[in-house]
Amino acid sequence: MVNITTRKPTSDSTVVLTQGDHPFVRHESVIAFEHAGFFSVSRLENGLNNGKLKKYSDISDNLFSVIKQGLLASPRTPQRVKNYCLERF
């Protein structure tokens, strides 16, 4: 899982999003690959059920491809995440 965050001068700019890329994105944002990690389904379901997480619409297939490529290209993606993803896509 990766998160989307507001772009700052020190942000990883491997994947930059702008308004219109997804309804969640309201201003220039980036994928924070340095925070990429693994989360169990039960942890995500608990977050949704207790209101700590909010579900948004799915991203487009094209944006998913861009994010996958960025995850492998970013120097900030943790190596264990890259290794896992390299085995799967």
Image (cartoon, grey):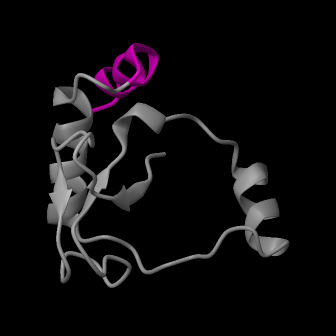
User: Which quarter of the figure is the C terminus placed in?
Assistant: top left
Q: Residue at x 75, y 68 (%)?
A: 52
Q: Position of residue 4 (x, y in %)?
A: 38, 58
Total labels drawn: 0
Quadrant for residue 28, please give it. Answer: bottom left
Secondary structure predominantly adopted by residues drawn in magenta? helix
Q: Residue at x 24, y 39 (%)?
A: 12
Q: Residue at x 19, y 62 (%)?
A: 63
Q: Position of residue 29 (x, y in %)?
A: 27, 62
Q: Magenta stretch containing residue 80, yes or no?
A: yes
Is residue 4 rendered to the left or right of residue 55?
Answer: left
Q: Position of residue 20 (x, y in %)?
A: 18, 83
Q: Magenta stretch containing residue 86, yes or no?
A: yes
Q: In the depicted view, which residue is nearer to us: 11 or 67? A: 11
Quadrant for residue 76, please give it. Answer: top left
Q: In the depicted view, which residue is nearer to us: 87 or 74? A: 74
Q: Position of residue 9 (x, y in %)?
A: 22, 46
Q: Which residues are magenta?
A: 78-89
Above or below residue 28? Residue 73 is above
Above or below residue 65? Residue 55 is below
Q: Residue at x 47, y 37 (%)?
A: 35
Quadrant for residue 70, please give it. Answer: top left
